[in-house]
Each structure stands twice: as structure tokens, then as C-alpha cells.
Amino acid sequence: DAGVIQSPRHEVTEMGQEVTLRCKPISGHNSLFWYRQTMMRGLELLIYFNNNVPIDDSGMPEDRFSAKMPNASFSTLKIQPSEPRDSAVYFCASSATNRGKGETQYFGPGTRLLVL
Amino acid sequence: SQQGEEDPQALSIQEGENATMNCSYKTSINNLQWYRQNSGRGLVHLILIRSNEREKHSGRLRVTLDTSKKSSSLLITASRAADTASYFCATEETSGSRLAFGEGTQLTVNP
């Protein structure tokens, strides 16, 4: 198995532009998580899906952030418009759980986002 | 919100020594997990210990859990330079369905 796949690996954009991050979870996993990691705030859970349904999006910072999971093998995290404070590493993780309980999460390599 | 707090924030040891990292948390948990992150990479799961377990081993790793003190420790024995990484504890609360990660301990093992 290729593991969790994220694209792009690096993204540099200008303030105000739309950014779309993509994630392909491990086949057979039914939970998917989006995290953001910064030096100041550490690792923060933004949103997670179970069976393609968003379960908890309380970590999404504001309306500029949106996430979708149209099917079991694909998810996107969109920032529109982007701001410099969105610069961070964004991780996608997946697990074979029910509502995210009690099992290992497998992380992708992350997308390093820089908003100028 | 972050629940686990690791201690120390940074640890530097010589190859062959043991490394001990601690994690404290605040609420009741279903389980506690330890992850490792190499620089510029994603997190990798190391070990999971459930709330009814007190100790668990995996290779050179030993994890303990004391639910009365709401704390856990990760011991890496006979450390190697390749163990250099950040180590995070993550707790799954009984009230919710998400993992809360601590800020991590940066371990440096000098050859």
C-alpha cells in the first residue's frame, strides 16, 4: 500500500489566492483527518470525516476554510482567500475506525504551504 | 484543543543511553498513543496503550500509563542516532472521538 498520499507537497501562493490541498487515504480506511501544524500552535485537528461524512469541524479556523470528501478515496481542503497566517504544514491522516475512535492514524507526508 | 503535555520539551543524549519522555493529560481517556515525527515528515504511530493497561512494550519502546495521575511515559532503551525525532503523545478522550496531540518532545541522540 502506498500509504496516505497528499498533493501538492509544497505550495507557494500569494495572499488572496485560492489554495486546494488534496488527500488520498489508505484504501479501506473509513476515517479521514485534516491537521495543521505550526511552530506556534503545534498540531491542530481541523476536521475529520467518517464514512465520507464530516463529523467534527470545530477546528476549522474560519469560513475561509472548507473541506470535502466526495468519495472514500479522495478529500480536499480548500482555503479561499488565503492569508499569510495560513502558512503551515497541513497533514492528512486516515484510520480504520468508527467515528475516529481508538485506532492508529496513518499520516501523509504533508503539504507545506507558504502564503506570501 | 491540545490535551497532552510532553516533558521535557527537548532532550539530548548520547547513543546507547536511554531516553524517557513524559506526557500529562487532563481528562478521562479511552487510550493514549505515542507518535514520532522526523524533520519534514508526517507523524508515524509508535504504540497505543488503552486506559485499562498499565504498561506496554514494543521492541526498544516501553510505555507506561498511570490513569490516577493522568500521565504516561515513553522509554526508548539503547538509543540510536536514528531515534532523533520529535515524539508526540496523543489522547483520545472518553467524551469525544478525536485525538488531542501534545506539543512534542524533541529528542536528539548524539553519535
Image: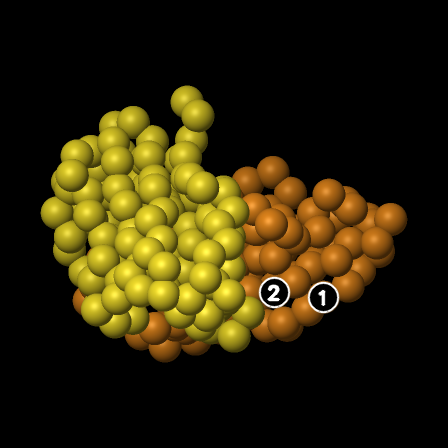
Chain colours: A yellow, B orange
Residue at 68%, 69% in the rendered image = B10
Q: Is residue A80 above or below residue B79?
A: below
Res. A88 visible in picture = no
Secondary structure of the residue carrying tag 2 is: strand
| Residue A53 picture location, percent across and down | 12, 47
Q: Nearer the viewer, residue A15 or A59?
A: A15
Residue B40, horizontal then vertical, whole percent: 60, 50
Residue A108, given in percent of the width and then of the height, sits at 44, 41
Query: Which mark is on residue B11?
Result: 1
In this picture, residue A110 sits left or right of residue A77: right
Q: Residues within 10 Å of mark 1 (few under 14, many from 20)?
A: some
Foreground pick, A48 / A78: A78
The image shows residue A8 at horizontal and vertical percentages of 45, 41
Q: Answer above or below: position of A93 versus B106.
A: above
Q: Chain of mark 2?
A: B
Q: Name the residue located 50 percent from the left edge and 43 percent from the top edge.
A: A9
Instruction: Depth check: give the residue in front, A107 or B62.
Output: A107
Name the foreground residue: A31 vs A103. Answer: A31
Q: Is residue A56 above or below residue A61?
A: above
Locate residue A81: give its quadrant: bottom left
Task: Give the structural element (helix, strand or loop) at label 1.
Answer: strand
Residue at the spot of label 2: B105
Q: Which amino acid lies under the numbered mark 1 shown in the image of this protein? A: Leu
Task: Tell me the quarter of the image containing the N terminus of chain B.
Answer: bottom left
Asked if marks 1 and 2 touch (Cβ < 8 Å), the reply is yes
- Circle number at residue B20: none
- Local packing at callout 2 (Cα closer than 10 Å; few below 14, some 14-19, many 20+) is many
Q: Is residue A64 depicted above or below A54 in this figure?
A: below
Q: Amino acid at mark 2?
A: Thr
Indicate which disc, 1 or 2, sits on the residue closer to the N terminus: 1
